[in-house]
Amino acid sequence: MKAPNVTKVTTHVLQEMKLREVKISMLTAYDYSMARIVDRAGIDVILVGDSAANVMAGHKTTLPITLNEMIYHASSVMRAVSRALVVVDLPFGTYQGNSREALLSAIRIMKESNANAVKLEGGREIIESVDRILSAGIPVMGHLGLTPQSINKFGTYVVRATQEEEALKLVEDAHLLTEAGCFALVLEKIPAVLAAKVTREISIPTIGIGAGNQVDGQVLVLHDMLGINKDFSPRFLRRYNNLYDEIKTSVENYISDVKQLKFPNEKEQY
Ligand code: KIV
């Protein structure tokens, strides 16, 4: 079903979509130009993900990105967006183990970027931070399953919660985050059957990435689905374009035109 006919997507709109079984579309964006296109296309939610560390800055993990850098990306996106709900990742080290710092980090994001909500990775371990941020009136999106900020604990990017103990903890965490007052939950790289169970059991929308289609919505990293990055090919990724080759060919054609004095031509000069 099509995106709802609203001028601005809010957390209430997402809740309504779950109730009416209208699927939620979500993509990442990190800059003004891309965010503008994605918003005009009618996406429901834009995530200023800490995947910016990989995609925009070339880091191997999401851990190095700073709060100031996330605020820079989020502000650029906010200047472009009018309809989508914009959610910003709290970066690694700004909320774990210290709920006061979590609150201050979330307030900085909201105040300095004008974003609509924040996202935190984890369950019981971070619930105090979630509570404190929510108490300031800041909407929080949860994130369970493969949580990339914990990659050094996991040691690998394989599917999470395939064993009973981890699956039980994930279901428990999903309930905890719901009861705390989160407005939605990202489920990353977990078995489809488990994601379906969580989606049935909790009242808030679930947004899957590598979590099957029995969830309330889907999210992908924009640069991956556009085929800008060719090095990342997990099973869950569908490429809707091959922009790596398209951009490279365009640049090659430009270089060739410049070298051969074909650009600019008479009409392209003063
Ligand atoms: O940072 C990110 O892009 C994310 C998505 C993969 C959900 O958290």
Image (cartoon, rainbow, N blue to C red):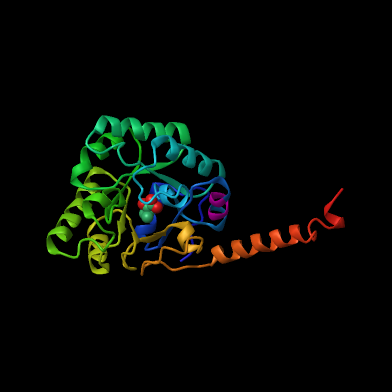
Expressed as whole percent of the image width and height from the top left, the position of residue 200 reads 25, 62
Q: Give the residue at the far left of this rendering.
A: 165
Asked whether residue 35 is drawn in magenta, I would say yes
Expressed as whole percent of the image width and height from the top left, the position of residue 262 reads 80, 61
Q: Is residue 60 visible?
A: yes
Q: Is residue 229 left or right of residue 126?
A: right
The one of 63 and 140 positioned closer to us in this rendering = 63
The one of 199 and 94 positioned closer to us in this rendering = 94
- Magenta stretch mostly in which secondary structure? helix
115 is higher (above) or lower (below) than 251 = above
Count numbered badges in the picture.
Answer: 0
Q: Which residues are magenta?
A: 34-38
Residue shown at the point (12%, 59%) measured from the top left: 165
The one of 234 and 129 positioned closer to us in this rendering = 234
| Figure quadrant of residue 145 | bottom left
Expressed as whole percent of the image width and height from the top left, the position of residue 238 reads 44, 68
Asked whether residue 36 is drawn in magenta, I would say yes
Q: Give the residue at the far front of this rendering.
A: 259
Q: Is residue 81 visible?
A: no
Residue shown at the point (48%, 50%) measured from the top left: 29
Residue shown at the point (19%, 43%) measured from the top left: 125
Q: Is residue 59 left or right of residue 96?
A: right
